[in-house]
Image (cartoon, rainbow, N blue to C red):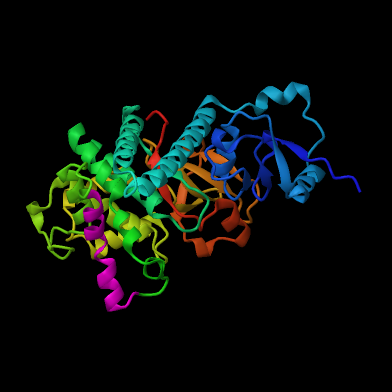
């Protein structure tokens, strides 16, 4: 039997649920492998940004056939101009693609950096310094930076993804406080590497889903010391960076670890990373997957552990509806916030009908539609849950959109 010819699918036809192969070398795209199962809209935006005319369809042809049964065979020529996206929508899509691409590049570079720490410390330091400079460029390339939701399409965030999100949040806070660039560089470098000591913690403890025993907790709480020892051994990292790595779990009320530092004994850049880490850690926990719930937890349980001024800046940075927040809109549709904007009550939202139909990027600032309420993942229909990828890990990167 003759082997079936591979199906070349136009990039414009991509949709959730398909499994495709990129017609590129692994070195020419930011994904981890050529075979990609499309689970969320960000992956589609990334593929469109690669400027390839087609992809190879591996699985999911039935989804396309279902679409074709309802779709007209061709669009009448006279109405084609009406289908063109407004400039704002094009710029938004472009910004989302760029933020996602930059985040994936950061993750890949961060993984290389972690792998070199012991075998090639000088190479690791150079890579880390370059990565921080790139992040600063991305932060400062627009007058007023905003946050974008980015993801690798995984339910669990890795140590490297977490480090990037903490660095991004920390830099946003530092910019709002107008900290000097030298402090921002040291802080970002410490944030990227703050959890590197967890590589010394056995996987059976680090990946444990249930609560840790007292002995396991004590071992886990040694990870800041492990990270400090790993980095200080090279003699390359500044003391300010090492302080962030060792003390990112210290709180101003003295209840943190490993040394129970208090108040002004904790430098401002370490305080900022401690806050960003606290928020992102709550966000990535099993019980608190909503940014608003994570913020609520901070206010209720940790308001005395961080400076009030820093918490206020974090709230301003995240906005009323932080990226990753699930919402119900005034027209009855549901969505996930993709990007903050200067119109704090009108973010950019990936939305669909309650049953998962008609997914689309919605710019609320361009519509007579508002956010009615914040919702939880368990309130979503199963199809909408899949379309919105509501259970994917939430990560942040700078939006490339002009404020």
Q: Position of residue 386 (x, y in %)?
A: 59, 56
Q: Which residue is drawn at 54% across and 45% down?
A: 32
311 relative to 94, above or below: below
Instruction: Give the extent of the magenta segment.
Output: 212-231
* Residue 339 seen by the camera: no
Q: Which of 237 and 147 is in front in this view?
A: 237
Q: Position of residue 68 (x, y in %)?
A: 79, 42
Q: Residue at x 30, y 62 (%)?
A: 297
Q: Position of residue 31 (x, y in %)?
A: 54, 42
Classify residue 179 as left or right of residue 196.
left
Quadrant housing residue 247:
bottom left
Image quadrant where one finds the C terminus: top left
By secondary structure, the bulk of the magenta-drawn segment is best described as: helix
372 relative to 287, above or below: above
Q: Which residue is drawn at 77% across and 47% down?
A: 61
Tally of numbered discs: 0
Q: Nearer the viewer, residue 40 or 318?
A: 40
Queried whether the magenta region covers residue 36, the answer comes back as no
Classify residue 238 as left or right of residue 61.
left
Q: Residue most toward the right?
A: 1
Q: Where is residue 272 in the image (x, y as percent from the top left)?
A: 21, 48
Queried whether the magenta region covers residue 227, the answer comes back as yes
Q: Nearer the viewer, residue 376 or 185?
A: 185
* Residue 381 seen by the camera: yes
Quadrant housing residue 263:
bottom left
């Amino acid at each position: 039997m003759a082997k079936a010819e591979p199906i070349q699918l136009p990039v414009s036809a991509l949709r959730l649920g398909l499994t495709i192969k990129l017609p590129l070398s692994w070195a020419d795209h930011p994904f981890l492998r050529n075979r990609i199962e499309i689970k969320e809209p960000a992956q589609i935006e990334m593929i469109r940004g690669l400027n390839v005319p087609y992809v190879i369809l591996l699985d999911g042809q039935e989804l396309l056939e279902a679409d074709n049964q309802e779709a007209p065979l061709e669009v009448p020529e006279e109405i084609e101009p009406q289908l063109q996206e407004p400039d704002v929508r094009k710029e938004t899509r472009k910004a989302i693609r760029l933020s996602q691409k930059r985040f994936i590049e950061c993750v890949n570079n961060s993984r290389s950096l972690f792998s070199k720490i012991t075998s090639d410390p000088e190479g690791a330091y150079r890579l880390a310094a370059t990565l921080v400079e790139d992040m600063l460029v991305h932060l400062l390339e627009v007058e007023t930076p905003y946050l974008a939701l980015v993801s690798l399409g995984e339910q669990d965030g890795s140590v490297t993804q977490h480090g990037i999100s903490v660095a991004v949040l920390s830099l946003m806070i530092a910019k709002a406080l107008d900290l000097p660039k030298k402090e921002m560089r040291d802080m970002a470098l410490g944030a990227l590497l703050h959890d590197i000591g967890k590589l010394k913690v056995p996987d059976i403890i680090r990946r444990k889903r249930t609560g840790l025993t007292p002995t396991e907790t004590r071992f886990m709480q040694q990870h800041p010391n492990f990270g400090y020892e790993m980095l200080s051994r090279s003699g390359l990292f500044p003391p300010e960076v090492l302080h962030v790595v060792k003390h990112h779990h210290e709180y101003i009320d003295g209840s943190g670890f490993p040394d129970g530092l208090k108040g002004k004994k904790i430098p401002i850049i370490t305080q900022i990373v401690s806050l960003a880490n606290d928020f992102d850690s709550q966000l990535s926990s099993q019980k608190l997957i909503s940014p608003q719930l994570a913020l609520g937890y901070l206010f209720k349980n940790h308001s005395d552990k961080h400076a009030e001024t820093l918490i206020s800046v974090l709230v301003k940075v995240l906005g009323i509806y932080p990226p990753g927040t699930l919402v119900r809109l005034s027209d009855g549709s549901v969505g996930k916030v993709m990007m903050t904007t200067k119109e704090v009550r009108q973010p950019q939202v990936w939305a669909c009908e309650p049953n998962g139909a008609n997914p689309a990027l919605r710019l609320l600032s361009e519509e007579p539609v508002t956010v009615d309420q914040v919702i939880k993942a368990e309130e979503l229909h199963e199809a909408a849950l899949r379309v919105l990828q509501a259970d994917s890990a939430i990560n942040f990167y700078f939006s490339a959109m002009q404020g």
